[in-house]
Amino acid sequence: MRDPRYDVLFEPVKIGPVTARNRFYQAPHCNGMGRTFPSSMAAMRGVKAEGGWAVISTEQIDIHPTSDITPGTEGRLWSDKDIPYLARMCDAVHEHGSLASIEPVHNGKWAANLYSREVPLFPTHMPNSDGNYPLQARAMNKADIRAYRRWHLDAVKRAKRAGFDIICCYAGHNLSLAGMFMLNRYNFRTDEYGGSLENRVRLFREIIEDTKDAVGDSMGVAVRFSVDELRGPEGLEADKEGREIVEMLAELPDLWDVNVSDWENDSQTSRFAEEGYQEPFIDFVKKVTSKPVVAVGRYTSPDRMVSIVNKGIVDMIGAARPSIADPFLPKKIEEGRIEDIRECIGCNICVAWNNMKAPMRCTQNPTSGEEWRRGWHPERIAARADDGAVLIVGAGPAGLEAALAAGRRGHDVILAEAGDELGGRVTRESQLPGLAAWARVRDYRSYQISQMANVEVYKSSELDAAQILDYGIAHVAIATGAHWRRDPYGRQHQFPIPGTDNVNLLTPDDIMAGALPTSNVLIYDDDHYYMGSVIAEQLVADGFEVTLVTPASTVASWTSHTLEQQRIQARLIELDVKIITSHELKAVSADQVTLGCIYSGKLHHLEVASIVMVGSRLPQDKVYQQLLKDEELVRESGIKTLKVIGDCHGPATIAAAVYEGHRFARELGETVADIPFERELTELATTFGLP
Ligand code: ADP
Ligand code: SF4
C-alpha cells in the first residue's frame, strides 16, 4: 500500500481543458527511434503510460522541410503522411489512461537541412550550428515569419487529429526558432520582431496564441522554456530576461515546463550534478504564474519529489531519464514499493545512443528500446521454459542482471562471485571521483536478488572449470568480466610501443586496487571515454602531478555523446592537469617517454616517473576457454546451455553488460532466430518518382 506521505504525488493536475491523473510528467526526450523506428517509439511511450506517468511527451517533432535535422531520427510532422505513426503513439498512451503531449519545433539554424536541401532559417544571417557544416542560415523576412506561424499551426492541427491531448510550445535548449528570436546575441532585427524584449518575445507569444485559438478549448497548451543558459550575461539569465519572459507570458499557457539550456546543462550527468540541480534556476517560476509548473532534475527519490511539491517549487515532477531507467517509477511509489525503483544512475548512455542516431539504450533498464522489437517488458518476463537450474559465474553487472532475470523466470539460480563484494566493475568504478551513483546498478540488483528465495549468492567463491563441470547445472553463464591491458593497444594506437615491456606500467585496475604511482605520472588515454579523466582526478586528489596524453584532439572525446566532454576538459584544466592532445606514445624508458604528433610525426620527450595505460581491456575468459576446449566433458556434465556474457564476451559499456545478462535469461530454453528481433522497414513507394 502507498505511504500516505506520497499521496500528494497522486493528486490530479488540470492543464487547461485536460486533466493529468497524477503529478508524474514524462518530459519530452529524444530516443533515437522517433520516426525511423516509430513502432519501437510508440511501444516505449506506451510502457511508460502503463507505469503510471500521467503525461507522456514526444521528443521534438520538426514541422517543416526548413527544419530538417537529418541524420537525426526525431519525430516529424510535415504533412498528413506523418499522422499515423504519431497516432500510434497516442493510442499506446491512451490505452493506459495517460495524456499524450507533443512538442512541435522549428530548429532554425540548428537544422542543416541535409535531406531537404532548404536554406536554414534564423532571425538574422548566421552560420548553421549543428555538425560544423559549411552552410549558413538566412535572415527571415516577414513572409517567412508568417509561413513559420502557419507551419506551426498546421502541425498543431495535425497533432490534434493524431490524438494528442497537449501541445507543448517550445522555446528551449537553443534548439527552437521562437527561442532563438528571444536572444540578444542572435536577434539584430530592426522590425517588430527585434530590439526590445517584448519584440524578441513576440514570435513566441504569437505561436502560443495561435495554438490556443486553434485548439485551446480541447487541448492543453504547455510552454517549454529554458530560463537560464548558464553562460552569464552572454545568455539568458534566470534573474534577468529569463524571469522577465516568464512574467510577460505568465498566464498565457496552461502549463510551464521550465529548465536550463543547452541540453548539456539540462541533462547533466551524476558526475557533475546532483538530483534537483535545476531548482535554484527555476524556483521563481511558480511565484510568477498561477499555472502549473513542471521541472526536471533527475528526480528518483519520492521524498525529494514530495518536498519540491510541498515547497511550491513545482506542481508536476518532470522526468526523462528517470522514466527511461524505470518506466514504472510512479506505479512503484503508488504501490508502496519504493525499494523496487530502478534509479537512473545519470550516465547519459541513453543520450549518447540518441546522439549517435541509434535507438537509445539504458544502463539500468535493459528493456529500453526492446519493448516492441523483442517484446521485452520492464516488469514482466515469461515463466521459465524448462526447469533446469542456472549457474552464473561472476557477479558484475552482467552476472547480477542474469541472476535477477533468470530468478524472475522461476529458475533456481546460483550466483558465484570470486570477490567478497558483489558488483564487479561497478563496485570498483563507483569509488572513483564523481561515479558514486553508478553503484545503483549493483544496489538495485543485489537487493532484488536478496528478496528471492530461488537465487543463492556465494561470495568469495572463485570457480574453475572443473568445479563448474562438477556442479552439472543445466544452464551456465560465464560473466567473469575483463581487465585493463598493460600493453599499448587502444582505440587509435594498435601496435607495439618500444620499451613498454621493460617499464612498470600501471593500469586503471591497479589504481582502483589502491596502487600509487611514483611522483609525476603520465596517463595515456587511448580509450577516450571516462576512465582516463577520472583516474586523472583521482591522482590529482592523491597529490600527484598529472599529465594526460591522448591521440584524440580533445580529452575524453567520446563523451561528447554523453554531453560531458566540455565539463570533463574544464575540470581537468581547473585541476591543473597538463593536457597534451593529438599525440601518441612512441617509446618508453624508465624515466622518459617519447610522444609523437599524430599529424606531423614530430617527436617530443617528457620526463615522467610513472605511466598509467588507459587503452583497452581483455576478457577474463580463462574459465570459459577451458570449458570450450572439452565439449564432450561439458555435455556429459549435464550442462545444456553454456554462454559467455558481458565484458567477458566483449568488453564494452556497463549498459552492454546488463543487457547481455538480461538477454541470457530471456533466451534460456527459447528458440532464438538468427535475427533475434523484429525489424521496422520503410515501405516502398508505389512508383520510382521519375518522370
Ligand atoms: P561484467 O561487466 O561483464 O559484469 P565485471 O568485470 O564487472 O564484468 O564482473 C565480473 C565479476 O566476475 C567480478 O566481480 C569478478 O570478481 C568475478 N569473477 C571473475 N572470475 C571469476 C571466477 N572464476 N569465479 C567467480 N567469479 C569470478
Ligand atoms: Fe539514466 Fe543512464 Fe539509463 Fe540514461 S542510460 S536513463 S542516464 S541510467
Image: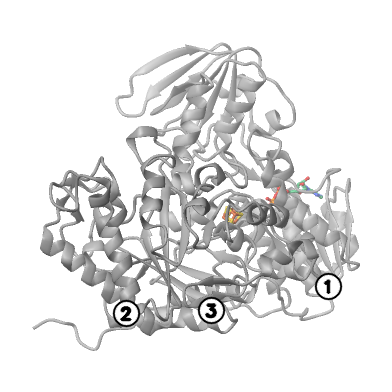
Which amino acid does the dot numbered 3 rest on?
Val
Horizontal side of residue 631 vs 596, given as left or right: right
- As drawn, 361 above or below 265: below
- Whether disc 3's CB lies below 8 Å from ligand 2 is answered no
Residue 142 is marked as none
- As drawn, 270 above or below 193: above
Q: Earlier in the sequence, mark 1 or mark 3?
A: 3
Name which residue lies at 36% across and 78% down.
Answer: 215
Quarter of the image containing the C terminus?
Answer: bottom left
Residue 66 in sight in this render: yes
Which amino acid does the dot numbered 2 rest on?
Lys
Front one among 238 and 569: 238
Density class for disc 2 (Cα within 10 Å; few <14, some 14-19, many ≥20) is: some
Where in the figure is residue 68, as x and y percent of width and height? 27, 63
Density class for disc 1 (Cα within 10 Å; few <14, some 14-19, many ≥20) is: many
Label 3 vs label 2, nearer the camera:
2
Mark 1–mark 3 Cα distance, whole angstroms, equals 33 Å
| Residue holding disc 1 | 411
* Displayed-image quarter of ligand 2: bottom right
| Residue holding disc 3 | 93
Q: Secondary structure at mark 3?
A: helix
Q: Earlier in the sequence, mark 2 or mark 1?
A: 2
- Whether disc 2's CB lies below 8 Å from ligand 2 is answered no
Q: Secondary structure at mark 1?
A: loop
Front one among 17 and 46: 17
Location of residue 102 (image quadrant): bottom left
Front one among 411 and 584: 411
Where in the figure is residue 513, as x and y percent of width and height? 74, 31
Mark 2–mark 1 Cα distance, whole angstroms, equals 52 Å
Where in the figure is residue 559, as x and y percent of width and height? 48, 42
- As drawn, 97 above or below 176: below
| Residue holding disc 2 | 157
